Amino acid sequence: MATQSLEETIARRYTQVLERIAAAAQRAGRRPEAVRLVVVTKGQPVEKALAAVAAGARDLGENYPEEGVQKMAAVHATGLRWHMIGHVQRRKARLVVTHYDWLHSLDRLPLAQRLERLAAEAGRVLPVLLEFNVGGEASKSGWPAWDEAQWEHLLPEVEAVVALPHLAVRGVMTVPPPVSEPERARPFFRRLRRLRDFLARRFPQAAWEELSMGMSADFEVAVEEGATFVRVGTAILGPRPAAPPHAARPHGAFQ
Ligand SMILES: *Cc1c(COP(=O)(O)O)cnc(C)c1O
């Protein structure tokens, strides 16, 4: 059998993931176009990001603000959108405001307030998703949301974020605990959707249409449960090379 080039392999996997998304959407009575595929290029060499773009990818996701900015210098295409999906340290907030189209992982009020100041300075509005921890793992980022009886306590901080004029709250995001089978992630995706519905009733002034959930191992279940963004890395680009020693662990990685 002829060996496939990196470009061919990535193009084939990209198309397969799109087909699986479309099939999952159809099973749930949803339009496939309602789901956007974010190809997660974190930890991957530029060549793989270029191959994904050549295959048609227009939404790319990164965990480290600086790593993404380096890739942006090498990867161009019309209509490319860069998504920050990892934990953002305070001192990296400016990079996010300056370079990224979306922030999926807004996980605390002080970061929101800093982003607000920087976005106001830059004269832009940053679309953001609020990250929630719906699984209860201590290691995960996100506002605590595994106990539905405690959701009321989230409201003051969410209200404060929604009120910031240079952040546009567009929905919610989660990274559920690792599970042995995709089906086991379903309760977490359902909980995130219920939380979104709960917040949308309380704060109708924000647009809560986006549900960012589902990764390589479980994106079809996420689509069945209403995901509008799935974040898929290894299923398209293959395994990530080991992280450089200076890098902190990307959150959600190495599970
Ligand atoms: C790494 C990562 C992904 C992609 O994970 P894969 O298992 O490679 O698909 C998605 N979301 C977040 C937040 C990540 O950190």
Image (cartoon, helix red, strand yellow):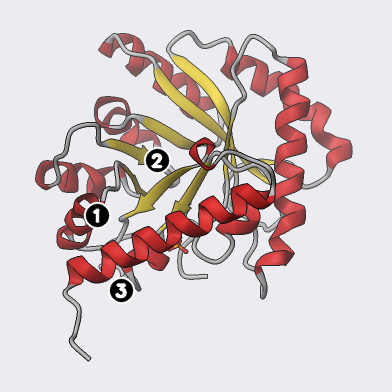
Dot label at residue 242: 3
Dot label at residue 201: none
Q: Quadrant of residue 242?
A: bottom left
Residue under the point 60% across and 26% down: 209
Query: From the viewer's perspective, is 32 left or right of 194?
Result: left
Bin the neighbour count of mark 2 within 10 Å (Cα to Cα): few under 14, some 14-19, many 20 and up. Answer: few
Q: Quadrant of residue 88?
A: top left
Residue under the point 80% across and 33% down: 151
State the residue position of label 2. Answer: 89
- Sequence-earlier tag: 2 or 3: 2
Examine the rendered structure and indicate whether residue 104 appears above or below residue 37.
above
Q: Nearer the viewer, residue 8 or 182?
A: 8
Looking at this rendering, what residue extends furthest in the right direction? 149
Q: Secondary structure at mark 3?
A: loop
For residue 245, say whether it is visible: no
The amino acid sitting under disc 3 is Ala
Q: Nearer the viewer, residue 24 or 215?
A: 24
Q: Look at discs 3 and 1 and give the one toward the viewer.
A: 1
The amino acid sitting under disc 1 is Ala
State the residue position of label 1. Answer: 55
The amino acid sitting under disc 2 is Gln
Q: Position of residue 41 (x, y in %)?
A: 30, 55
Label 3 within 8 A of ligand 1 by Cβ = no
Looking at this rendering, what residue extends furthest in the bottom direction? 1
For residue 193, say whether it is visible: yes
Q: Look at discs 2 and 1 and give the one toward the viewer.
A: 1
Examine the rendered structure and indicate whether residue 21 appears above or below residue 7.
above
- Sequence-earlier tag: 2 or 1: 1
